[in-house]
């Protein structure tokens, strides 16, 4: 069998199981198996592979047919301008989360004093914090997570990217392990409400960590705590940036306004046009 035939068969099997992006998944898994770039399959469609490689590939396809996310199968995921190691103890970083990185960088460009102190609450794989540490030369970054396994992986990712020295890793509940004041606080906290959790696709519900997604009855619990507690950790005129669910904008604005701690509350949409990030500035004297 050629790679052309192997990929066609695998794509058909994935399509028959209603797996989205079947062809892409088949190509990514085959390139992972062979340790080559996906482009090779187009350059050389008549290429053949060994029996051992074919068996290994079929095992990976069998896992995908059970809806295991490709990123957990290969153990990595692209984010921003780099590749992160991921495993089942962390949320797979989503492309939409790059919006919060973009917004934090926009804010940083207006900062005159260095170093810029940044805090990422619930860092998971480290995605947001590592992108910021990489882009901002004079950044001092603190990251937290309640999950020690997630924090260990974030630390490993930081080491791979040569960023370990710029980042301070702290385990604990929200701001509990944090001290000092920050210029920018970012967080992509769990925000799935109980009712929505049940409706998540199997690939998410059965594989991604519940504690990275689930946020109680309303889905707003983490925001409420973050908004009130962050006020005590922000410099005057420092910024809080939160990734939000598409339907949460009004509720989160309401919480921010009610806290009396922020002004310049603004929402940024993602590239699908959905509300994705809310940013707010710590009021002087609020
Ligand atoms: N920032 C990452 C991960 C988001 S998932 C990204 O955008 O990809 C949310 C993360 O919050 C998970 O890693 C989860 O372990 C962490 N978390 C959940 N409850 C927490 C709490 N009470 N305090 C700190 N972190 C928490």
Image (cartoon, rainbow, N blue to C red):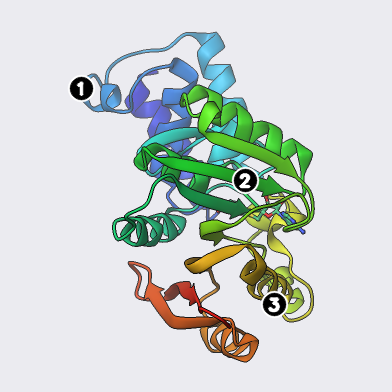
Q: Position of residue 250 (x, y in %)?
A: 54, 89
Disc 1: which residue = 43
The image quarter containing residue 90 is top right
Q: Note whether residue 241 is visible.
A: no
Mark 2 closeness class: few <14, some 14–19, many ≥20 residues within 10 Å: many
Q: CA distance from mark 3 to mark 1?
A: 53 Å
In the rendered image, the vertical position of residue 241 relative to residue 102, given as above or below: below
Q: Position of residue 233 (x, y in %)?
A: 63, 62
Q: Which numbered disc flags the more N-terminal residue, 3 or 1?
A: 1
Quarter that holds the N terminus: top left
> Where ligand 1 lies, by image quadrant?
bottom right
- In the orientation shown, which residue stands out farthest toward the left? 43
In the rendered image, the vertical position of residue 149 relative to residue 185, given as above or below: above
The one of 191 and 51 positioned closer to us in this rendering:
191
The residue under the point 59% across, 57% down is 181
Q: Which numbered disc flags the more N-terminal residue, 3 or 2?
A: 2
Task: Classify mark 2: helix, strand or loop.
Answer: strand
Q: CA distance from mark 1 to mark 2?
A: 43 Å
Disc 3: which residue = 224
Disc 2: which residue = 143
């Amino acid at each position: 069998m050629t790679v052309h035939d192997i990929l066609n068969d695998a794509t058909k099997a994935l399509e028959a199981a209603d797996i989205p992006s079947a062809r892409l998944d088949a190509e990514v898994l085959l390139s992972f198996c062979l340790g080559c770039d996906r482009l090779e399959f187009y350059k050389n469609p008549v290429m053949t592979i060994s029996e051992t490689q074919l068996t290994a590939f079929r095992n990976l396809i069998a896992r995908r047919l059970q809806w295991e996310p490709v990123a957990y199968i290969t153990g990595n995921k692209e984010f921003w301008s780099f590749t992160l190691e991921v495993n089942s103890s962390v949320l797979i970083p989503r492309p939409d989360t790059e919006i919060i990185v973009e917004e934090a960088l926009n804010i940083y460009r207006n900062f005159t004093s260095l170093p810029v102190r940044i805090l990422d609450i619930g860092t998971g794989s480290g995605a947001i914090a590592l992108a910021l540490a990489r882009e901002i030369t004079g950044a001092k970054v603190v990251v937290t997570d309640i999950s020690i396994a997630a924090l260990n992986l974030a630390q490993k990712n930081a080491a791979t990217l040569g960023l370990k020295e710029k980042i301070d890793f702290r385990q604990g509940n929200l701001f509990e392990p944090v001290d000092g004041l920050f210029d920018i606080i970012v967080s992509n906290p769990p925000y799935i409400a109980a009712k929505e959790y049940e409706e998540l696709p199997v690939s998410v519900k059965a594989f991604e960590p519940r504690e990275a997604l689930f946020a109680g009855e309303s889905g707003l619990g983490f925001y409420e705590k973050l908004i009130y507690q962050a006020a005590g950790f922000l410099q005057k005129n420092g910024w809080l940036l939160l990734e939000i669910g598409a339907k949460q904008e009004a509720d989160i604005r309401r919480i921010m306004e009610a806290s009396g701690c922020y002004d310049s509350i603004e929402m940024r949409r993602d590239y699908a046009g959905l509300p994705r990030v809310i940013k707010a500035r710590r009021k002087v004297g609020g």
